[in-house]
Amino acid sequence: MNRKKVLFMVLIVTVGLLPSLGAWAGGSRADLLRKWWRNDRFSARLGLTGVQKQKLDDLFAKHQLEFIDLRSEIEKSAVRLEQAMESKHFSENEARERLAESQRAKERLNNARMEYLLEVRGILSREQFMKLKKVTEERRQRRQQKK
């Protein structure tokens, strides 16, 4: 594969990683790591009980450091990829290895997020989960409109 194709692949991966990196690097936490259930208005809208809030707190504590570590892996792999691409002694194989490393790191974070979401779903009733999904989508749309 020629250099242009490798650069194009790097660009695609980098653009794909930006949302993950941006949320962390920008100083704010990803939605997943906010204690949304501790917002009184929001939790009332979902009808959360005290027991559910405590379970969500416990789940948050269980996963918080894991998510931080996984996002850090993504950042590190992005730096390694950038370094491989900018190296004086460029190696396509090295760049491909760093690209694969970045993809694996992103996949690990996505898998961890899904596991977390499955556990959240186990805490919430179907109705609460559907409300959460609806509210989350409404917030996402409002954010998009502001841009």
Image (cartoon, grey):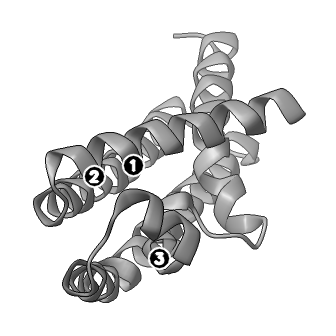
SS state under label 2 = helix
Residue 128's disc is 2
Front position in the image: 6 or 144: 144
Q: Would residue 8 appear left or right of 100 to someone viewing this image?
A: right
Q: Would residue 131 appear left or right of 25 to someone viewing this image?
A: left
Q: Which amino acid does the dot numbered 1 rest on? A: Leu
Percent position of residue 15, x then y? 67, 32
Q: Residue at point 39% right, 49% down?
A: 132
Q: Which amino acid does the dot numbered 3 rest on? A: Ile
Q: Which amino acid does the dot numbered 2 rest on? A: Gln
Q: Is residue 100 visible?
A: no
Q: Residue at point 65% right, 66% down?
A: 24
Task: Verify CB contact (< 8 Å) between mark 1 and mark 2.
Answer: yes
Q: How many marks?
A: 3
The Cα atoms of the two marked residues, 1 and 2, are separated by 6 Å
- The first of marks 3 and 1 along the sequence is 3
